[in-house]
Each structure stands twice: as structure tokens, then as C-alpha cells.
Amino acid sequence: MVKKRFGLLLAAAATAALLGACSEGDAQSTGKEDDVVDIVWYPNESGNDLKGARDAIGEAVGEATGKEVKHHLTTDYAIAIETIVNNNAELAFMGAQGYIEAKEGNEAIEPLAVPTGPSGTLDDAKYHSWIAVEKENADEYKDGDSYTIDPIEGKSFSFVSNSSTSGFVVPSSSILNHFSDKGLSEEDLMEGGPFFEQVQFGGSHQGSAVNLLKGTVEAAAFCDTCVDNYVEVAEGEANTPGSVYRVKDDAAEPFHTVPGEEFVLVSVTPVLNAPFVANTEVLSEEDFNKIRDVFTSDEIAGNEDIFVPEDSEASGLFKKTDGERFVEAEDSWFDPIRELSN
């Protein structure tokens, strides 16, 4: 399944490249400058609200290597993955599924560092994949004191990208397991007809959430961390089915068009945290070790532009609630996600 999806994403990447999918930097340029470290970012982390976090990461990499750092912002998962696979970037921040697909395309791709959970270890290095519906329709999904995804059959649905861990691989696996008696495949969930009335891909977690909040679809998959800067818990407990989330009044783009809109979680699944990865074909072993050392340092763990304090209103890549930091992770740590793709 990974090989098939990787082939699909490369085809999509070729099309997107022709359309100029990259929003900053020429992520499809040929040749690499020896004195430059290129970092490619998914659409989820390419927004203006995360510029401070990207710059802080870039500054740390530049100081560690003594090289110029260039950021490549994208509007397409496939472009981001293809960029590092084809040796046009040294580093990337991507989900576990994206890393698996990248490594399938280029064995030189290696995990560099993974953000931990509050314990400061990989034991709780998890975020959450959501399936959400608009608040006005939430009662349809109630099953006594709990919630069920039974009613999503025949509905219009939004995923993020078929290369998204928490925006496709995990929720599609949950759906296939829940409706196992129907003999569905992953491909059946990618288009309208076999199961959903209509399927859309938001291109980012933010985009998938906005598809739901604008009423374009009746249910959507996206993750907690990618929308955390834009929404707040209005009722219930965070990351719990039945919890109500509300878009902040001052939410940045693209949520600025849906302030005050609310949605309800009907399914919540823990997911392995997303890694920073390196292409060791274009990044030397010396630079790999330097960057890994600085990523896993106490200095980076205490950098509030990267690990934003829990009570801060600033936008950031990661929240600092306790001992969150970067640690090393072996390739085998991502095997649970590989198993979902087989």
C-alpha cells in the first residue's frame, strides 16, 4: 500500500510542480549548494503564523552547521515529500506516513529528531487524529453516553491528503475497521460512491477543518496540533469524543473566515508524533550529527519560539506543558504506522 500511495503522490507532485505549487522558494530546483541547508515544510506548517517557529529552527540549524538555511514552503504534501526524496532538500518536518513514503522513495532519508510528550520521552510522544462534525449535527452521532461513527456512511467527507498520517491513514484505518463487514479498501474512501457521497481533500489539516466549518462537507478528519492555534475547547475535555471546539474570534487565516463556528469530536485516535527527517545523501554525517545534537539540546527544549509555553497566546509548532523536547528515534519506532498502511 505504501508503494502504491508513493506512486500516486509522485504523480500528483509532477502535476502540482507544473502548476507552481510551492509558495516560497523553488522546491523543484535542480542541484544543491554545498553551503546551504534547505528545509521543506508541509502546508500545515507553511502559514505566516508559524514563521517565528520556522525561523527559530532555521537559526539553530544555521548556527550548528555554519551554513545558510533556506525554507521551502509548500501547498501540497506530495511536493514536500518529492522535494526531499529527489535530493532538493536536506531536512523536512513531516508526519510519520510522509516519512515512511519518503524512505520508500529514497533509503537515504533518516529520522533526525521527534518531539516528545510531557514526560520528555517517546513513551507519550503522541498527538490525536480527529473525526469531527458540525455541532448542529452532533446528536446524530450519539450512542447512549458515547459517540459512534456509524452515521458517516453516505455523508460528504474531507480528508487532508492521502499522505497525511492523522488526516488520512489513521482515520481511514479506523473507518475500515469499524465498517469491516462492508469489504471496503483504502481506495474506496478516496472518492465518492463506494462509501462516502463525496470526498474532498483539504490539502492541509487547517483546510480540512475549514471544509467542515464552511459546510462544504458533513464530516472531516484533521489533527489537534495543527488546529490548536486557531480553536479552543468550548465544552467538555480536550481530545475526548463529544467535546465541542470553537474557532477563536481572532483566528488567523484560513480560520479568519469562520470565527465562532463550532464542531464536535466523534472519534479521537492517538498518533505517533511527527519527525524532523534528513536526507543523508545530501547532508553530510558531520552536519547530521551537529543538527541532531542541537535539536536534542536543553537550549532548544527551552526555546519559547519552538516550544511555546502552555499559557502563551503565541503560535508555535509545539506546546510546552512540562518536559517536552526533541529526542532521537529509530526507524523501527514508526512501524505501527507502517502496519496501518499494509
Image (cartoon, rainbow, N blue to C red):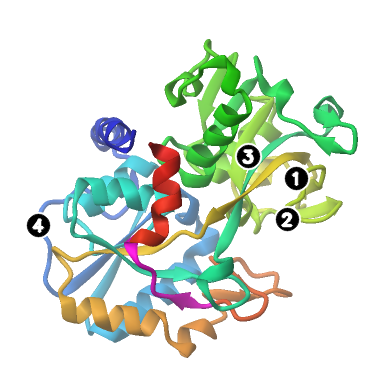
Spatial separation of the CA atoms under disc 4 and disc 2: 42 Å
Q: Which residue is mark 2?
A: 250
Whether tag 2 and tag 1 are in contact, CB under 8 A, the answer is: yes
Snapshot quadrant of residue 164: top left
Rendered location of residue 310, percent (x, y): 70, 74
CA distance separating discs 2 and 1: 7 Å
- On residue 183, the disc is none
Closest to the observer, 164 or 201: 164
Which structural element holds mark 3?
Answer: helix
Residue behind mark 4: 31
Which quadrant holds the N terminus?
top left
Is disc 1 placed on a helix, strand or loop?
loop
Residue sitting at 38 percent across and 41 percent down?
Answer: 76
Q: Residues within 10 Å of mark 2 (few under 14, many from 20)?
A: few
The earlier-in-sequence mark between 1 and 3 is: 3
- Above-or-below relation of 266 to 292: above
